[in-house]
Amino acid sequence: MKTRAMKVTAEIKKLFDEGSVKASLSLTVEGVLVIRGARLVDGKNGLFVSMPSRKNAAGEYYDICFPNNNDTRLLILGVVKDAYEKALKEQSEAAEAAASGDADGGEQEPA
């Protein structure tokens, strides 16, 4: 039986400049399942996607949803990294435009 690649998209909700959390995001799987509250984290072994979690009675956290295999985990990580890099680029371009006084795309009001 041949498997097909799952379609996953990531929407970066917020970027963080400090700390190990680099972004908060939502994931959409196959256009029918949305996972809110995921985070891109820079851990000791590099970037990884932290799924939403809850604290149990013992005070330990457990993921409430997660990839079921390594291939899916790597697929999600790749999609999130691409979205993160795009969001960083857009943020940088917006900051440069604002710093140059060109935030409206280059069109200036006539004098």
Image (cartoon, rainbow, N blue to C red):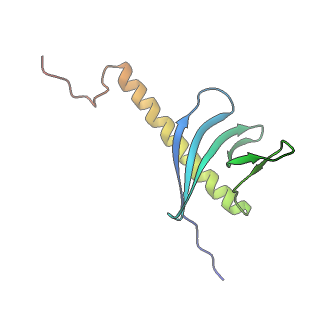
Quarter in which the C terminus is drawn: top left
Residue 73 falls in which quadrant of the image?
Answer: bottom right
Residue 51 at what x, y percent from top left? 68, 49
**Farthest front residue in view:** 57
Give me the residue at 66% from left, 35% from top. 21
Q: Nearer the viewer, residue 36 or 9?
A: 36
- Percent of width and height locating residue 104: 28, 29
Residue 95 is left or right of residue 56, and the answer is: left
Give the residue displayed 68% in from the left and 39% down from the top: 41
Instruction: Name the residue: 70% across, 57% down.
Output: 66
Disc tally is 0
Q: Residue furthest bottom?
A: 1
Q: Is residue 111 above or below residue 63?
A: above
In the displayed structure, 73 sits above or below 37; it is below
Is 78 above or below relative to 44? Answer: below
> As displayed, is residue 110 above or below residue 20?
above
Rendering quarter of residue 16: top right
Question: 62 or 90, which lies in front?
Answer: 62
In the picture as drawn, the residue positioned furthest to the left comes out as 111
In the picture, measured across the screen, residue 65 lies left or right of residue 30, that is right
Out of 69 and 45, give the one closest to the viewer.
69
Q: Residue furthest right?
A: 58
Q: Residue at x 66, y 83 (%)?
A: 1
Horizontal side of residue 23 vs 73, given as left or right: left
Of residues 73 and 27, the one nearer the viewer is: 27
